Amino acid sequence: MLSQQQQLKYSRQIMINKVGEQGQIALTQATVLIIGIGGLGNPAALYLAAAGVGKLILVDGDNIETSNLPRQILFSEQDLNNNKADTASDKLQQQFPDCTIEVIDEMFDQELADYYLNDVDLVLDCTDNINSRYLINKLCVQSKTPLIIGAATGFDGQHLMVNPLDDNSACYHCLYPSSEKAPANNCQTAGILGPVLAIIAGMQALTAIKYITANKVPTNQLSLFDGLTNQWQQFNINQNSQCKICANKNDI
């Protein structure tokens, strides 16, 4: 049951037919793991905490640099050289005291996956490099943990939901079977605009909220955003029967 204060606080969400009180209760009981607390992880964490998600686990081993400030909106110059996950946790906890926040101030790896993935409802990949994306995809498929991937460079962004609980769901490796075919650019090599990250992170947060509240979330659909034309494109993708990551996930 929601408290009277929670009913008041989340009243504008509860009045949405496809959320309602049961959806809000589901949000308060959910645990979401966010990997990468940079340009995507900052707004995604803000929106999920604001929506009433009960627990966020923030993962990032990097420290805050001056070049981060134009797009990593939780941070200020006073936070320079501090760990991103620690700092984001402090800011979020002040604004959203009802949200339980756990910090992992190191990079995500197999050991952390073994410890955490079976206890979370959902993972958001907010990292900015292809090697991390492949690793997170693999570990989520192995643990059958739903995953929402976001990425952006320049004026462009992409968004993909991977749901290993769905036998027909393609994974990131199906889309890009090798690193040679995957987008190699990141914000350090191609630059990035903060609002583009905010749009992609907003889509990740929206997808997470829809999933947690038992609304339909499309899988096998890659969404691409062009910030120069303000246009979205959706592409249907298929699970690769030869994919070495997800083709035999029922046997893992």
Image (cartoon, rainbow, N blue to C red):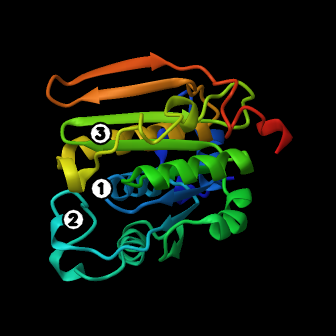
Of the residues shown, which amino acid type is indicated by label 3? Ile
What percent of the width, then of the height, locates residue 172? Answer: 54, 37
Q: Classify 232 as above or below 92.
A: above
Report, in whole angstroms, how far the alpha carbon at label 1 lies from the one at label 3. Answer: 11 Å
Query: For the C terminus, which image quadrant?
Result: top right
Report, in whole angstroms, how far the alpha carbon at label 2 lies from the one at label 1. Answer: 8 Å
Name the residue nearer the viewer: 88 or 243. 243
Residue drawn at (49%, 67%) of the image = 59
Looking at the image, residue 67 sits to the left or right of residue 219; the answer is left
Name the element at disc 2: helix
Name the element at disc 3: helix
Q: Earlier in the sequence, mark 2 or mark 1?
A: 1
Crowd rating for badge 1 (residues with CA inside 10 Å; few <14, some 14–19, many 20+) = many
CB under 8 Å between callouts 2 and 1?
A: yes
What percent of the width, then of the height, locates residue 100? Answer: 55, 69
Looking at the image, residue 208 sits to the left or right of residue 74; the answer is right
What percent of the width, then of the height, locates residue 176? Answer: 49, 33
Of the residues shown, which amino acid type is indicated by label 2? Asn
Q: Earlier in the sequence, mark 1 or mark 3?
A: 1
Crowd rating for badge 3 (residues with CA inside 10 Å; few <14, some 14–19, many 20+) = some
Of the residues shown, which amino acid type is indicated by label 1? Gly
Name the element at disc 1: loop
Report, in whole angstroms, how far the alpha carbon at label 2 lies from the one at label 3. Answer: 17 Å
Query: Pointer 1: what residue?
Result: 39
Name the residue nearer the viewer: 226 or 119. 226
Q: Nearer the viewer, mark 1 or mark 3?
A: 1
What percent of the width, then of the height, locates residue 67? Answer: 16, 66
Query: Pointer 2: what residue?
Result: 68
Query: Pointer 3: what residue?
Result: 199
